[in-house]
Image: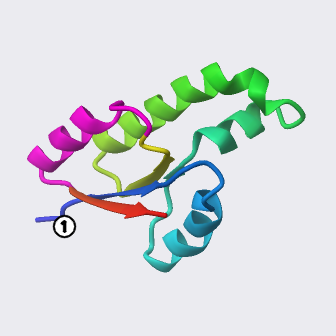
Amino acid sequence: MAAEPTCTIIAGPNGAGKTTFALTYLPEIGCRNFVNADLIAAGLSPLAPERERFNAARLFLREIETHIRNREDFAFETTLAGKTHLERIRQMRADGWTVMLIYL
């Protein structure tokens, strides 16, 4: 039986250094899938990423759901400002996922 998949959540307020931390830490733990709405927006519109926030948010959620469906280890970045991820985390844990929260 394969090891249970892991979701690493890197959380903290804006400006806390979440992305910088993730880009250093995630390779160290062997996590190759990092979902970040800001990086998605910058990829869609490098000169004006703020124009792509809505599209980036949709792609962010779609990418998370794809990793969950495929039971692939992944990490994502969030401010945890709302309850957006709460039910998803509960379901993942019920489905045998390891969910690790790192708060900066």
Residue at figure coordinates x 62%, y 20% from the top left? 54
79 w.r.t. 33: above or below: above
The quarter of the picture where residue 64 lies is top left
Of all residues, the one furthest to the bottom in this rendering is 28
The picture places residue 98, in percent across and down from the top left corner, at 21, 60
Residue at the disc numbered 1: 3
**Displayed quadrant of residue 100:** bottom left
Q: Residue at x 19, y 54 (%)?
A: 97
Residue 99 image point, x, y percent? 26, 57
Q: Quadrant of the N terminus?
A: bottom left
Position of residue 66 in the picture relative to residue 89 (left or right): right
Whether 95 is among the magenta residues is yes
Question: Circle 1 — which element?
Answer: loop
Where is residue 7 drawn, in percent x and y?
33, 55
Query: Residue 22: where, in percent of width, then height?
Result: 56, 64
Please identify the residue farthest to the right as the structure is shown.
47
Vertical arrangement, residue 58 with respect to residue 49, above or below: above
Q: Give the magenta range.
A: 81-97
